[in-house]
Each structure stands twice: as C-alpha cells, then as structure tokens.
Image: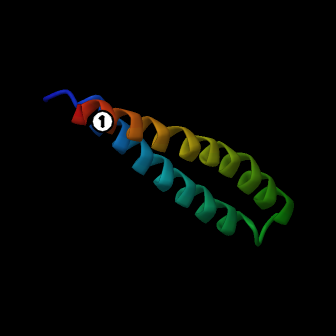
Amino acid sequence: MKPLSPYAAAKRELVMSIVYMAVITFQAIYVAPTSLTTAIVIFIIFQSIGVWMLIHFPKKVKELKEDQST
C-alpha cells in the first residue's frame, strides 16, 4: 500500500473529524430519551474535542497545500 502524502493525510484527518462529530451527535440524540443529563455531557465534552480538531486540521491542510504548490 502506497503511503499517503502529508496533504492527503491531513485531508483524511479533517474528514474523519467531521464524521466523528456526526457520530457523537447521533449518540447524544440516541441517549437523550434515557438520560438528558448524560446526553448533554456527551455532547458538550466530545463536541468540544471535535471543534478543537476542526480548528487544527484546516490550518494544517492549508499549510500543506501551500507547501505542495511551491
């Protein structure tokens, strides 16, 4: 299997973080009928991790894209 370029790996990480946030949202909605408090805690904690990733990875993709084009 051919190794991915850093740019392709960063794009993959960005997509995976978006998928991660969607899964956590689904889990929070699924848990909400049984325990609203648990659903809120799951949503806040894990979505804050997802937001951190979404802040980090686009910067990384942009830097790698600029490096790749030069």
Left or right: where 23 falls relative to 16: right
Residue appearing at x 65%, y 67% in the figure: 30
Q: Position of residue 15 (x, y in %)?
A: 41, 50
Quadrant in which the C terminus appears: top left
Q: Residue furthest right?
A: 37
Left or right: where 14 falls relative to 38: left
Quadrant in which the N terminus appears: top left
Left or right: where 16 falls relative to 20: left
Q: Residue furthest front?
A: 70
| Location of residue 23 (image quadrant) | bottom right
Residue appearing at x 23%, y 36% in the figure: 69
Q: Nearer the viewer, residue 69 or 58?
A: 69
The amino acid beneath tag 1 is Tyr
Q: Position of residue 36 (x, y in %)?
A: 83, 65
Left or right: where 23 falls relative to 65: right
Rate crowding at label 1 as few (under 14), some (14 to 19) or many (20 or more) other CA atoms within 10 Å: some
Colouring: rainbow
Residue appearing at x 19%, y 27% in the figure: 3
| Location of residue 37 (image quadrant) | bottom right
Q: Residue furthest left?
A: 1
Q: Position of residue 67 (x, y in %)?
A: 30, 30
Residue appearing at x 62%, y 62% in the figure: 25
* Count of marks placed on residues: 1
Residue 47, above or below 59: below
- Give SS at disc 1: helix
Q: Position of residue 53 (x, y in %)?
A: 56, 41
Q: Nearer the viewer, residue 14 or 1?
A: 14
| Location of residue 4 (image quadrant) | top left
Read off the residue under disc 1: 7
